[in-house]
Structure formats: structure tokens, C-alpha cells
Amino acid sequence: MLFERFAAKAARSVAMGLLAAWAFASGAAGAQQATYVGEAKCLSCHNQENEHFGDTQHARAFRGNPKNDRERQVCEACHGPGSLHVANTNDKSLIIRFTNDGVTPIEVMNGQCMGCHGGGQRQHWAGSTHDTNKVACSDCHAPMERHSKNGLLRRASITQTCYTCHQQQRAEFQRRSHMPVPEGKMSCVDCHNPHGSITRPLLKNDSVNETCAACHAEKRGPFLWEHAPVRENCANCHHPHGSNNERLLVSARPFLCQQCHNPPVGHPGQFFRGDQTAAAALAGGAQSARVIGRSCQNCHVAVHGSNHPSGARLQR
């Protein structure tokens, strides 16, 4: 059922894109059909653009080793035939523009990119979160300028490009405990596929747990004794981008454990409090060993699951 809904959504998105492209082409060309004018004609006006374009992967491929007739057109491979634009440069609708001024529909812009870059990692683009939110390929990529080492990104790195829109995640990565993304040891695409996937948050795997287990294989299981919230979703206990608690925990221990274990089975029924820490004991408080150190995990060390015959309580 889920696959059928996704397929129907993707089909509607593709159909809308084709309709928009047809409408744009019809309105732009009018009664006259545009024809190719050649790269030299484009460079007679766009010298500044050529200075930036000449150092890109597109320029090297289109000029040095074109795969087909479309790539041999260089500028017009992406911007479309330019004869009508040359005849009337004031009418911006006579050429495909990769801008946010609304002249060229986003579906048309993305359709030009997908003409060469379709399939592969982009097979789920249609109907994805970025597609349905009208994100253009040129919002993340600069096809005519080189700002990054790879991918013709608009910023110097993948992470900085994603931060342009995802300000909440940018703030989360500044928290005390975070994935090593700001340090450059990871990037957003280690977990997400920005070009589309079968999950809503664009995960590279089928679920949150499968994504986490790609690196944290020791937490994958299966275990003889399983911890229910771990089996369900790693994000029940961990915030994937960053947290002010240790180990990306959504809450400090023991309060995280007490969200489910209330009252704790086999323990006194009261909640553990902040005045039971070692520091509070120096001031005359009632110190509790279940609050110090790793709290509940002082004893329940195998909190992600245990394969020990006597590990029913995740103590070994």
C-alpha cells in the first residue's frame, strides 16, 4: 500500500512537470520554433559568465568530450535553443533561466538537469520532499560556477549548502554533544540522500535504525534480550543531529529512563532528583548511586540489547 501511494505521488509529480514544461515551451516559442545559434553567439554578450563557466566540470565535458549532440551545444544544452532570445533579449521568457525570478518554471529548470542526471541516486526525486517543496537543482548547485571541489555546489561543502535552508539543524550541530559534521568528519549525505528516497526525511536507508546501524553495527542486533525502544527507533533516546546531553541523548540520565520506567521495576518508586548527586551530597543532600556516573547504566550496561543467557534485565 505504501509503495502504491508513493508511485502514484511520483507519477502525479512527473505529469505536472511535463505539463509545465509543455506550457512554458509553448508560451516561450509562440508561433516560431527556436533554433540553435551556437556557443560563439552566446559568448558575444556573456563574456563574464564564460569566465566562471570555463573552470567547471560542465565546460570541460561539453567542450572537450561531449557525449551527444545536446552536449555539443554547450550553453544551449541547458538553456535551450537561443535564436528567439538573440532576436529579443528583453523578453526573458524566450530562454530557459536558472533563477528564482519566476520566469522559468521550476519543473522546467529541473527537467533540463534531469535530462542528463536522471536515474541513479536521483531515481526517487519525483515526489520527494525537496521536489514537492519546489526546490530547484540550482538552489543547491551552481552549474556555471565552481564554489566547491565536487558537485558544483553553491557553497564550499555539502554541509554548508544544506545549512542554507536547514537552520534548525545547523543550530543543533552547535550543541555540546553532536555528530562530527561541523568538524568535517561527516556530511549530511552520509545519512540523507537530498535527491530523494523512499523515506520522508530522505534517509539513505529504509529506516532510522538501518541508517544508524550502517556505522553503529554493534547496535544492530538481533539480540536474545531486546530493549523495546531501541528496536523501535534509535531516535526514541538519541537526537540524531545534536543534544546538550551526553551521547546525543534526548534527556539526561536517569530522567530519560524514567520516562518509560515509572516506577522502576525492582527499585524504590520515587523519582531520582537533582539533589541526590555527588555534588549535592557535599552540601548535605541524600546521595544516590543510581544518579552518579552513568546512572541506570551503572548496572544495566547492555542497554541496547544483550545476548547473554542471564541478560534479561540488560545487566550483562
Image (tube, rainbow, N blue to C red):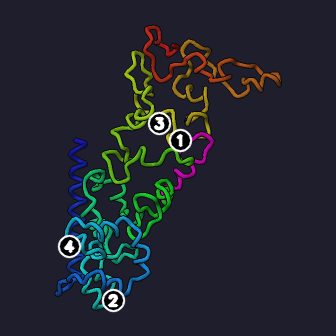
**Could you give the CA–CA distance between mark 4 and mark 2, rounded to whole angstroms?**
22 Å
Mark 1, Cα crowd under 10 Å, few <14 / some 14-19 / many 20+, is: many
Distance between the Cα atoms at labels 2 and 1?
49 Å
Decide whether residue 299 is among the magenta residues: no
- Residue 236 placement (x, y as % from top left): 47, 33
Structural distance between the alpha carbons of marks 3 and 1? 14 Å
Closer to viewer: mark 3 or mark 1: 1
According to the picture, the residue beneath numbered tag 2 turns out to be 89
Image height of 46 relative to 281, above or below:
below
- Up the image or down, 240 lies above or below 44; here it is above
Residue 309 percent location from the top left of the image: 43, 8
Q: 141 or 30: which is nearer to us?
A: 141
Q: Which mark is residue 138?
A: none
Q: Amino acid at mark 2?
A: Thr
Of labels 2 and 1, earlier in sequence is 2
Say which quadrant the N terminus sits in. Answer: top left
Mark 4–mark 3 distance (CA, rounded to whole Å)? 44 Å
**Residue pointed to by mark 3:** 235
Please tell me in which quadrant of the rendered image residue 75 appears: bottom left
Residue that mark 1 sits on:
179
Q: Position of residue 280 (x, y in %)?
A: 77, 26
